[in-house]
Structures are given as C-alpha cells and as structure tokens.
Image (cartoon, rainbow, N blue to C red):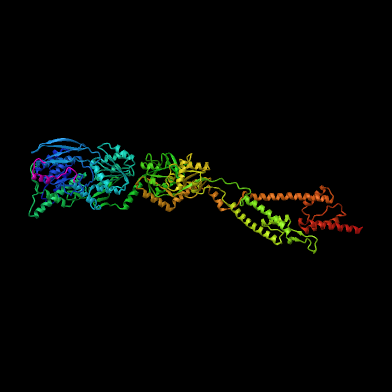
Amino acid sequence: MAAFEKAVEEAKFEHVAPAFELDPVIIKVKVNTDSFRTAVAACQLLDQGVAAIFGPSSPSTYGIVASIAARYDVPHIDYFWRLNEELQADQEPKNPKPMTINVFPDSDMVGQPAHAARICAGALALIHALLHLHYCICVVTSPRFRCRTYTVTPRVCNVALPLCHPVYRGRTVAFPPLQLRRCADDRDDRRRLNDRLPVSLAPSEVTLTLLKVRASSIDENRENVFQAIADVAVSMKWNTFAAVYQNNDGLSRIQKALSMRRKKDSVITIRRLGDGPDYRSVLKEIRSLSICNVIVDVEPNNIIEVLYQAKEVKLLADYCNFLITYLDSTKIPMWEVRNKTTTNITGLSLRENDVEGINWVESAVLYDAVFLVYNALEALNARNKDSNASVTIDPVPLSCENEEKYSAGPNITNLMRELSNQGKITGPITIDENGRRQFFNVRIMDVREGESVQTGYWDPDGLHSIDSEQERENYLYKSIEQKKFKISTKLGPPYVMEVTDSATRGILIEQTRYEGFCIDLIEEIAKLLNFKYEFELVPDGKYGTYDKETKQWNGLIRRLLDRDADLAICDLTITYERESAVDFTMPFMNLGISILSRKPEEKEPDLFSFLSPLSTDVWIYMATAFLAVSIMLFLQARMAPGEWDNPHPCNPDPEELENSFDLKNSMWLTVGSIMQQGSDILPKAPSIRMVAGMWWFFTLIMVSSYTANLAAFLTVDKMDNPIKGVEDLAKQTKVKYGAVDGGSTSAFFRDSNYSTYQRMWAAMMEARPSVFTKSNDEGVDRVLKKRDYAFLMESTTIEYRMERNCDLDKVGGLIDNKGYGIALPRNSPYRTPISGAILMLQEKGLLQDLKKKWWEERGGGLCSKVDQEPTVSSELGLANVGGVFLVLLIGCCGSFVIAVFEFLWNVRKVAVKEKVTPLEALVAELKFAVNIWAETKPVKISKSSGTSSMEGGIGRAASTARSIVGSFLHLDILDKFDKDNSTNNRSDDRKIN
C-alpha cells in the first residue's frame, strides 16, 4: 500500500488551491478468500464515510466489494487485471457494476473459464443483497464441484449456502445454476430485487455482446491487453511456438492472444508451469520439442527465476525468442539473464514515466487511479460552483444495515468516465461506459546488453515501430561483430579436407588442421562482416535427413535445431524439406545432379581399319563386280569388231588381226579404274565403252563413299560409351546406378513425380546388392572398381573428381538445378547480412576464383591436356593406318617373289636356247643384274671373241627391238623378229660360202 499512500500524499500538491484533502484508510483482510471478512471490512469503511473504495487485490473477494459499492453508490476503483464477464449473444449490453472503475487496461475475453473464486464471491454478494430484501437463495451444485455449506440466519428465513470451488482441469468450467425462491409475496420487494442485483454469478452477457460487435468492425477498437499481446506475437511471424503460464488468469491472457490471429498451420504448445519453485521439467519438455519461440505469462516475482531455469536447460539460448506478457518489464532486470547470449527477449511496458518507489504495474495503476479520483472530485466541485443544484461531495457514514447511499458517488464515477486523463505513470486513461479503461499505450521493449530499448509501441490503432531500418541494421551488424560464430561442417573434398603436408596451413579443429573451399569462403565472409568464428565437425558425419518414424533430424540440421551451432556449411544442398526446419542463405554455388561413370576402355585400333568404312558384304560384292565386269569386257571385246586391230599398220592386208582386251588387259583396266589411276588400254567399240562407263560411274560412287566414310572412321572419338544421358540410363538394365543414402540426390528421385525418375528410384530400391552408398567417396570408388555401375551426384563434385582422375567421366547434362547454401537456425537475424556478403563476393568474382583454386590449382588439372588433345588435332597414328602399310609391304614382297620366278624362268630359257648350263646362264644373268651401270643387255651369252662383234650387233638389234616393243604383251612380235634375224643370218652365210 506504499504506492497508495504515496499517491494520496502527492495529490495534495496537484492543485495550487485544492478544495479537498484526501485521507487514506486501509483495512487488511488476512485471508484473501474470506468473503465474509472482506464484506465486514467494506462495511467498516462505509461506516467511516469514504469517497471511494480501492481494491481488493484478491479476485476471490473482489465481487463482494463491488457489490457493496454498487449497493450504496460508492465509487469502487479496481487496479488489477480482471477477466471480463461473459454474456449471451442475444442479450443487450449493460454495466453489471455501475460504480466500479477498473483503471487497469481492459481485457476482453471470449469462451474462457471464469475464475472459480469469483463464483463464490459473487454468491456472497448476491446473498448479501437478498438478505436485505428478505429473500432466500438456494444454490444447486454440480457433481464436478467440491462444496462446503454455511448456514446464515437472516431476519426472515434461514439460507443454506454451498460455497463452490470448481476443480479446474484446463477446460471451460460449467457454472452451477441458480434457483431463487421468494420468502414473502411482495411485489415491491421483487422490484427492489431486480433493481439491486449488480453482479451476476454466471459470466456477464453484456461483455460477450460488446466483444462481438467490436471484433466484427474490422479492428476499429482493439482496446485490450490481449490484443496487444496478440499483435506483438503476430509481428514476430512465429509459425511454431510455446506458451507457458502459471495461473488461470495467465491462461486466459495467452488463449486470447493465440485465438485472435493464429494461422491454420501454426503449431502451438501450451504448458502450465505450476507453483514452483522448480520449473525445469516443463522447460525441458519444451526444449525437447525443438521449440525456440516462447510466450511467458507468470507472476512478476517469478519471471527472473523462470528465465534463469530456461537458460539452464538451454531453452533460453541463441536464436530463441521470448515474449514476456507482464506489463512492466522495464522494472525487471532481464538483461542480466540474457548476458552472453543473443536471445531475443521482448517485453511489454505500460509505464511511460517513472516514479521512485513505484516498481510494479499494479502499483503504478493504483498511483494513477488516486489522481484520477482526485481530479474527478475537483471537477465535481467546480461544477457545483457553476450549478444551481449542487451535489454534496463530502462523504457521510453509511451502514450496511440501512439503505442510505452516497449521493455524490454516481457523479464521481460519471466524471471519471468523462475525463480523459494523462496518468502520471501509465499514460493516457480513458474509461468507457462500463467502467473499463479502453485507451492506453503499451511500449514494446527489446532487452539488450545492460538495458531495455523501446523499439515500438501498441495503441488502439495497432502496432507501431519507432526505430528506423537503419538503426536496426546498425544494431544487427554491431551484434555480429561482438559474436563468435560456431560453425558446424562435414568432411568432403574440396569443401573441407584434412591438411596432411603442413603444420601451419589451414585452421585447427580438434587438434587437426583442415582447409578447403568452405573454410576460405567463411574467411572471406568474416572479413566483410568482421566477426570471429570457430569450426566443428558434425559428430555423426551426416548432412541432415528427417526420419519420419522418430520425427527427428540428424547431421548438420540437428546441430542447428539444438542451437549447438550458429552456421552449417559444406556441400549442403538447399531443399524444401530442409528449409522447413532451418533457414538458408542465398546459394554460394549453383549446380545440378549428373551421372558419374568410368570412361570406357580405349579400343585398340584395328590393323585393317581402312576396311571399316565398308562392310564385309560390300567388299565381297565389289570383288564379285570386279571379276564380272572384267569377264564382260573380255567376252564383249572378242565379240565387238571394233576391238580387233591390224598388228602391222604398214601392211594394209594383214593375214591376221589381234585384240588388246584379253583377260589380263581387261582386269588391268578395271583395277586401274577402281584405283583412280586409269589405263593405257582404252575401249573403242560402243558396247565396250558403255560397260567401261558404267564401271567408272560405279567406281566413282564407291570410291567417294569410301573416302568420306574413311575420314569419319579414322577421326571419330575413340571411346565407346553406350549411355549418353539419364534417359539411356533409365532404359537399360546392364549398368546399375545409385546415390548417397539419405542425401538430397536420393530425396530428389524419391519425391519426383516424373515417370522416368520414378522408374529409376524403383530400380535403385529393388537392386541387390544395394546401390546406395554412405558417402560420395564410396560411390566414386565403386564406379572405378565396377564398369557396370554409375553414380548419381552433384555436378560440381563430379567436376572436382574428373580434374584428379582421368578414368572418370560425366555423362549427359544436369538432371535438375539447385544450389549449396549456408544453413542457419530458424529466424536467425544473420541470414540477410551473410547473404549480402555472398552476393558481394559473387559480384567481385571471388567465388569463381575460389572454385578455380580448389578445383584446378590445388591438385587438379591432371586431365585437361589429355582431354584437349583430340579436339585440337585430328592426326592419325600408325595404329590407325598400319594396315595400309601392311598391304603395301605384302604387295611389294609379292611382286619381288614374282620377279624372282620370272628371273629363274628366263635363266632356264637362256640355258636351253644358248645351250649352256643353267649355272652359267644364272651367273651371267646375275652379273648383268647387279651391274647397275649397264644400260643395255645382250641377247645371247658370248662364247668367243670372233663372234662377239656380230653377236653383239645382233644382240643390240634384239635389245633395240625389245625396247621398241616395250611390252610383254607383244612377245609374239619379238619372236617373229628373232625368226627374221635367223633367216637373214643363214642367207648371209650362204653368200659368204
């Protein structure tokens, strides 16, 4: 009551010439649920003559005092939070307590359980009124209530009163019906009864009707504490949160806040803390649900203890949000609990000014209520001076046994409703016709290091922000600089790798040094945002998968949900499922799923690859056509007259004709044509020319086709891969394919609606042994060891592997498009700054430089030259054209063998003709063959020097004749020439003789 006495004392100085002096009278009731003693105390106050009654604070005895005040028209001032009474939808609104003014901010409520003690207090109030009217009341109770009975002896009749205490189980309580029976048939008494019942035991119908009208008017009048709490909660955009309360009034406030603006898909958990002092069990349960947004409605004396215990169980931790519904949070040192955490604690404050010694919101409201009553008295006094009909303001002693009333009471309460006063502490005060405070401001306080800072305020027009965007951004970046981020990661080259060749390179994680793309990326972001960090390896080595059976996440996502890490970075794919649990920055790398397979073995070039352009059947058909055309030329040439020529052009009447197209010459013509070399024998007859022309046309097409196809065969890629893309992979069954078990790639095929991907997922699930792997490394090893296995993984990882292993190949394009991002806890304030830093690094080209560094420069680039050689040059190796050289060699060897046989056959002929031994003929022919300087060859082997000249001349003549003939096809002419020479020699011999 220090606030009450302080207000009464300071009211003396409110006006320069005050007309009244307030005198405080305080009576305390030891048992706050004893309505009889409270009623007696109220009657004692009336006996002393009071201008207004303040209190009581107990909800159990509040009703009896309000009833007595209404009975004798004494202003009743309430300064505690009260649950408004409920009324039926079809009932007209009215004021159930015309003399009661509640200066505490109004609380409208729909469908909430009334406080149990208020029923009993209301029952006593009703009995008190009925006793003075000589009526009796019987209260019929329900089996759900525990009752105790008092016997009251009035003047006319005895009344048995069961005092009912409902057993509250978290549900709406059904109230006992009332049955009235009149003890005397008196219409005047009945009329007085109807006029003097200011309190209803059941929730008031007026309140319900009024609330419905306001709720349907598009939020024109949102004048209640519930609405303020609801608006603040909605502004935080919580999808999932928990609400904890300590008593039934707290539950009412929370339920109102939740029911007014709640999304259909919101998950809300409500728990009662109990009387304490240990609340850890409930707080642990909330933390086990991975809930990080909490509304706290507890007694103000317990707020600090609840927050400390929440901190002990790691519920009050980084990235968690707490909303404290107590309306004077500035007087509670919550920043001490928040110390060394980034927990967002939001408080509410009705206090606009501070007065020394006033530390609780009820005390502040009581302080302002005293001044409101005092100003009403002064205003009434001023009206009395200006009015002819004055009202006696001075209070007179009243008795609960009489019907005399305080004449100025209704005027004072009406003036309190009319005056719009500015409270000394709690700001504007406006009282409506029902005695409720409608207009008030609630300040939104953000608890920070060592202080609470106002970030906005709530009034009947809604929620307003007073801090600018720049101020919020500056505070955010300042908090980033003061924070040391704990970053969880997972091993996987080149993102995070262990350093094995240096003791100084990289960063230290648990006595081991690591380096990689992600570590360099965090370093660049830290330089831009100026924060400190430390890395950890995720204990289970998982990316993060949701188990539908246990309803739990693992891996990196689990670390973020448990608030054991501030960031999670590795080759972590951004998926819808993961984004439903945590937040992601913008992608720092874009990629897609692709197929990793082993390069097919390089084929050994075929020795006779020059035959490949044409099939074996075509070669057979060409050989057959060659023979057929050659025979046709031979036969048709013999039939054609134009092909028979005079062997001696000088002899006009030759005895015989000769034909150039014998079988050998015919074959020579066809071979020369197909080899594109021509021939010295050309057809003259039309039929032969037609055959030759058709053959030349045939050889033109075949040789051109062969040449074109030969170039394609010799320059085509030497690798033979039957799978060109994902469609080819899905259609075949020989090559098995798989992915990392539980990874984003597996989830993509599992959740896809595309028929091809569904078929692939079914094939992967049915494959035995399993085609899934525990990691990318295992999948790559499996590809290298088995030629009939393909691995589905991210394209960037495939590119990294291909830079270091030339046996690996990426098949086809990207199956989907996605990205790697940095994961953060849900609603993390650092998401926007880190995304901005990533965007800045991307614009500067640093992300591409980092990728080039870790993909190519650090151990990569091994296969780049090998891969580029086939595209830069199309040169053919010896292995490709070796068959041509072999054919040439065989042909040359064959011709040499034929030459040897021709030489030996000639030696035999010479030996027979010259009548020398074969050895002599062989030696003579060999000597001549090895004599490379000899340009002419004698016809006969010389036996003596005397005949050598003549024989030499004859030999020279024969040699000349052979040279003239120039062809082995005219050997018959040469023989004839030899015969002529022999005849001439015999004639000369005869002449000599």
Check the image and name the residue furthest to the front. 639
Q: How many marks?
A: 0
Residue 24 is at least partly visible in this image: no
The residue drawn where x is 84% and y is 57% is 981
Front-lying residue, 220 or 444:
220
**Percent coordinates x, y for residue 120 in the rendering:** 17, 39
The picture quadrant where one finds residue 681 is bottom right
Q: Which secondary structure class fits the magenta region best? A: loop
Residue 640 is at least partly visible in this image: yes
Relative side of 951 to 533, left or right? right
Q: Is residue 261 magenta?
A: no
Q: Is residue 193 magenta?
A: yes
Check the image and name the residue furthest to the right. 993
The picture quadrant where one finds residue 665 is bottom right
Position of residue 813 relative to residue 503, above or below, is below
**Percent coordinates x, y for residue 843 in the rendering:** 42, 53
Residue stretch in magenta:
182-204
Relative side of 425 to 801, left or right? left
**Percent coordinates x, y for residue 37 in the rendering:** 13, 38
Image quarter where the C terminus lies is bottom right
Front-lying residue, 975 or 424:
975
Position of residue 213 relative to residue 507, above or below, is below
**Percent coordinates x, y for residue 434 in the rendering:** 17, 49
Relative side of 330 to 932, left or right? left
Front-lying residue, 174 or 821:
174
Relative side of 30 to 864, left or right? left
Front-lying residue, 67 or 841:
67
